[in-house]
Image: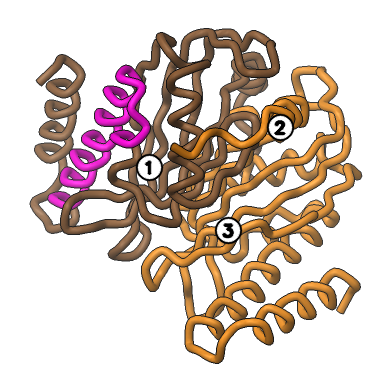
Chain colours: A brown, B orange
Amino acid sequence: MNRRTIMTSLTAAALLASLPESAGAHQAAGDEALVSAWLENCVSSWAAGDADRMFAMATDDVEWVNIVGMHWKGKAEVLAVHRLYLNTMFKGVPLTLKSIESIRSVGPDVVIAVARWSVGQFNPPDGSTVPASDDRMTLVFRRTANGLSLAHGANVQINQAALDAQQAAGPPPSA
Amino acid sequence: MNRRTIMTSLTAAALLASLPESAGAHQAAGDEALVSAWLENCVSSWAAGDADRMFAMATDDVEWVNIVGMHWKGKAEVLAVHRLYLNTMFKGVPLTLKSIESIRSVGPDVVIAVARWSVGQFNPPDGSTVPASDDRMTLVFRRTANGLSLAHGANVQINQAALDAQQAAGPPPSA
């Protein structure tokens, strides 16, 4: 168990302790553990350049929209591009899970999570250089007996200048 | 019924005609009509600057991640920023639905759609100019008796240069 796993477990335990004893509270803590497990596997798969491990828990019709708007449909296509990219432009690039910002159930079968990642600088095939940045990743999972299976991913690169400008402007009028 | 609505209905009818008679085929055609209806309302709400109409069919815990990675949580917050932006930086900016690229069910309660939009040039609060571009929008809906209710949106701006480079490189090896 590495430091991040321990911290995640502590967070889940703290969440459980702070919520009333109910099926909902137990499910929330369970979902956090399930999402954390999926993301931890994502981190280690990235480091190992192992796309098959990364998408071992994914539905056959999984789709992925990446930060430049490429859209891959179905497990075979998602696997093929990740096998390539994890071993070329992302090889050796640092990836850090910064936080799980949101976990929600939609009906009994589906869990939506939003995760924030830091990604180091990399060079895509077009020859450009993408500076180190943070991403906000939406993940839609289907519950299975063996954990969460990814049905959809959509990843957005955070434009920090735009977020800073929004923060400086203050919250919008709520009326 | 405007031209787009007619075209969408024709598309749904063509889809239904081309699929075998089955509950699944009827549901697929029905889902396309439901997603089209939600997106049509989005278009007219954008033009009218009416955020409340845009999110009339959304869950109370709806979340939205926009193209620069801002993340809004809950209907009140999503409404507040859209009330502001639809009447400032997006006021008078053309928005066109180019296609619904994907519609899938995840369990009985949830529908995921990916839509492609064209958005005209606009000026965000940071003073920059965002050129006209296309976006790929992931939408996660919950089925209700009254249609689809939005639970989550994640919008990615398409980097056409990156997509052109990918296309020029050809498909990745599927090994």
SS under mark 1 = strand
Q: Is residue A49 above or below residue A155?
A: above
Q: Is residue B31 above or below residue A30?
A: below
Q: Chain of mark 3?
A: B
Left or right: A33 with respect to B161?
A: left
The magenta span reads A25-54
State if disc 3 and disc 2 touch (CB < 8 Å).
no
Asked whether A43 falls inside the magenta stretch, the response is yes
Quadrant of residue B9 in the image?
bottom right
Q: Amino acid at mark 1?
A: Ala
Residue for badge 3? B113
Residue A95 drawn at (x, y percent)? 39, 16
Residue for badge 2? B163
Sequence order check: which comes first, mark 2 or mark 3? Answer: 3
Disc marking residue A113: 1
Is residue B70 something one can see in this rendering?
no
What's the distance in space between the residues labelled 2 and 3, CA to CA?
21 Å
Residue B81 drawn at (x, y percent)? 65, 40
Taking depth in this image into account, of A78 and B104 the one nearest to the observer is A78
Left or right: A12 with respect to A156?
A: left
